[in-house]
Image (cartoon, rainbow, N blue to C red):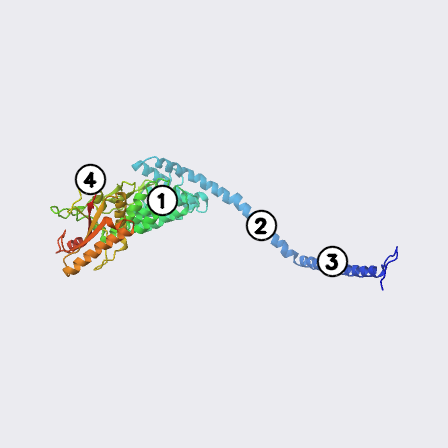
Amino acid sequence: MATYKKRGYKPKKEKVEQEVEENFDEAQSTTAEVFNTLDDTANKSEQWIEKNSKALFLGLVAVAAVILGYLAYNTFISEPNEQEASNELAYPRTFFDKAEKSAGKPADALYNIGLNGGDGKYGFTDVADKFSGTKAGNLANYYAGISFLKTKKYEEAIQYLSNFNSEDELLGATALGAIGDAFADINQPEDALTYYQKAAKKKSNDFTAPLFLFKAAQTAMSLKEYTTAEKLYTTIKEKYPTTNQGRDIQKYINTAKYADASSAVSLAKVEQTKPAVTTASDVHIMNDVNALYNTKSEFLGKSVKGYEFLGEFVNLKLNDGTEFLALSKGFESGLLNFIKSDAKADKNSWFNLRRVLFKTGAADLDEKSNNQIDNVVKILKAYPNVNLKLGGYTDNTGNADFNKSLSEKRANAVLNSIVSKGIAKERLNAEGYGIEHPIADNNTSEGRALNRRVAARVSKK
């Protein structure tokens, strides 16, 4: 049955109001419980504080004492000590600055006064010792180390510079580099290399980083660590190309590459026994090339020990603008000079690829051969009208037929390597001559080594 509400009808409120009152009573009860809990907690906290008030007071006193002690130490001990150290450092620094503007014995005398003091004043060593915990005392280690370095007392220089600690962008790196200089001057290049590398890594900037990378590379060259040297030079090229060291760095990279390849055939004999061009009427041995390649760089008046090896390096410039470093009496120079000359292509002008190497009794190219083969490719790309003939040769030991076959395989191995690098095969020809056309005495091991070779001549230009 349908129901309806009469006009003016109002629902009963009794049940609703009863429920609200019940809910309100429950909320009041919960709130009361919370406040009771808080009161209990507060009471317990007050009781704990009352019980431990003495310990808390002593703790606060201790903290206050530490703070006050620290402030007092800074105010009455540290700061005055720092100020005194700074004042004492001023005297020897005056003589150091004068020494930097002088030379010879007068400079040494000034450095020594700075080190040892005078007229009742402290020198750098005194300040470093008596004020060791101060900034000025730390800085005195640096000045003492540099002064000892300038006066050639290298062990003392290493000692004081090692005691110096700084995150300063220039001073920190300079101190490490100066230790490297000291080790270089007492003929400890391995240690010098280590410190030059530390100095270069200290801070990346355009001042100290490329300088010490360069010195590290030079030292690596002196140790015949050519791969390391090449990496260091390359870092300069990539990170610091606009610096003094970076502007002309490519020739040093080439030098390291060239030396690395040459080391396989012994630096003592690089290009020393054969002129670049061999003719039918001119076969002789050139002994003891004495042109030395030296490199030095300056730092704080000191120089790194120059590295040197046989062979005079020149920068070869090709028609297409390509440049690379090569020995003045080497294959590349001889071939390029012949190409540029008015001489016609002939069958007698051969150029020996001294850095093309093979495994004993095999025609497998050693990877160190790539440097010279790459140079051949550069020359052929720059002079597209030039064709080459490659000849393979052996010494007279073993079977003659085997030697001829081996020499031909080696000549073809070089040809194929050149082709793989972008030169048309039609521009090249290869032939094996075996024991024919020796250029040295087969009765000696040195002579036989010279006769085992690959050579090239211009067949068209």
The image quadrant of residue 339 is: top left
Which kind of residue does numbered mark 1 sit on? Lys
Query: How busy is the neighbourhood of tag 3: few (under 14 within 10 Å), some, or many (20 plus)?
Result: few
**Front: mark 4 or 3:** 4
| Residue at 22%, 40% in the rendered image | 340
The residue indicated by pointer 2 is 65
**Front: mark 4 or 1:** 4
Whole-percent x, y for residue 96 in the image: 37, 38
Q: Earlier in the sequence, mark 4 or mark 2?
A: 2
Q: Earlier in the sequence, mark 2 or mark 1?
A: 2
The answer to whether one can see residue 381 in this image is yes
Q: Earlier in the sequence, mark 4 or mark 3?
A: 3
Q: Which mark is residue 35?
A: 3
Q: Earlier in the sequence, mark 3 or mark 2?
A: 3
**Front: mark 3 or 2:** 3
Q: Who is closer to the viewer here, 7 or 426?
A: 426
Which kind of residue does numbered mark 2 sit on? Ala
4 and 2 marks in contact (CB < 8 Å): no
Q: Is residue 403 left or right of residue 381?
A: left
Please tell me whether mark 1 sits on a helix, a strand or a loop: helix
What's the distance in space between the residues labelled 4 and 3, CA to CA? 109 Å
Please tell me whether mark 2 sits on a helix, a strand or a loop: helix
Instruction: Look at the image and tell me in which quarter the C terminus lies.
Output: top left
What's the distance in space between the residues labelled 4 and 2, CA to CA? 91 Å
Residue sitting at the far bottom = 1
Q: Which mark is residue 237?
A: 1
The residue indicated by pointer 4 is 341
